[in-house]
Image (tube, rainbow, N blue to C red):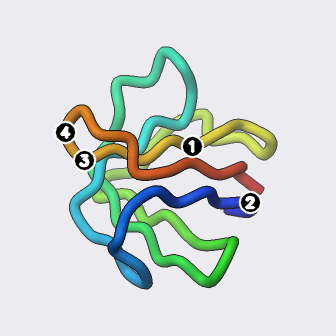
Amino acid sequence: MKEINWNDEDQGTVPDIMTKIRYSHKGALSTLIMKEASGEVVFDEPQNAVAPGQAAVFYRGARVLGAGIIQ
């Protein structure tokens, strides 16, 4: 992940968030490991069709926590 824009107080490792990797994706439970403006998403279960250049959006419930670009 690169260019992460983060709107939440949590920093560093953020567990138990829902990550959508494209508009039609229903979202999947994951952990975000942030390293300044970049980071790594670790999904609880493997996801299909993750592609560089797509946006990943992070949610907790209906609240948007942030977003970044998949590398």
Q: Residue at x 29, y 39 (%)?
A: 63
In the rendered image, which residue does mark 1 sit on?
A: 56
Q: Are marks 4 and 3 in contact (CB under 8 Å)?
A: yes
Crowding near the residue tagged with mark 3, few <14, some 14–19, many ≥20 C-alpha atoms within 10 Å: some
Crowding near the residue tagged with mark 2, few <14, some 14–19, many ≥20 C-alpha atoms within 10 Å: some
Cα gap from disc 3 to disc 1, whole angstroms: 14 Å
Q: Is residue 65 above or below residue 4?
A: above
Report helix, strand or loop for mark 4: loop
Q: Quadrant of the C terminus?
A: bottom right
Q: Is residue 71 above or below residue 27?
A: below
In the rendered image, which residue does mark 4 sit on?
A: 61
The percent coordinates of residue 19 (x first, y second) are 40, 45
Query: For this rendering, which residue is in front, 67 or 16?
Result: 67
Cα gap from disc 2 to disc 4, whole angstroms: 23 Å
The percent coordinates of residue 50 (x first, y second) are 62, 41
* Amino acid under disc 4: Gly
In the rendered image, which residue does mark 3 sit on?
A: 60
Cα gap from disc 1 to disc 4, whole angstroms: 16 Å
Earlier-in-chain disc, 1 versus 4: 1
Q: Is residue 16 above or below residue 57?
A: below
Cα gap from disc 2 to disc 3, whole angstroms: 20 Å
In the rendered image, which residue does mark 2 sit on?
A: 3
Earlier-in-chain disc, 2 versus 4: 2
Q: Residue at x 46, y 56 (%)?
A: 7
Q: Are marks 3 and 1 in contact (CB under 8 Å)?
A: no
Q: Which disc, if any, is residue 27?
A: none
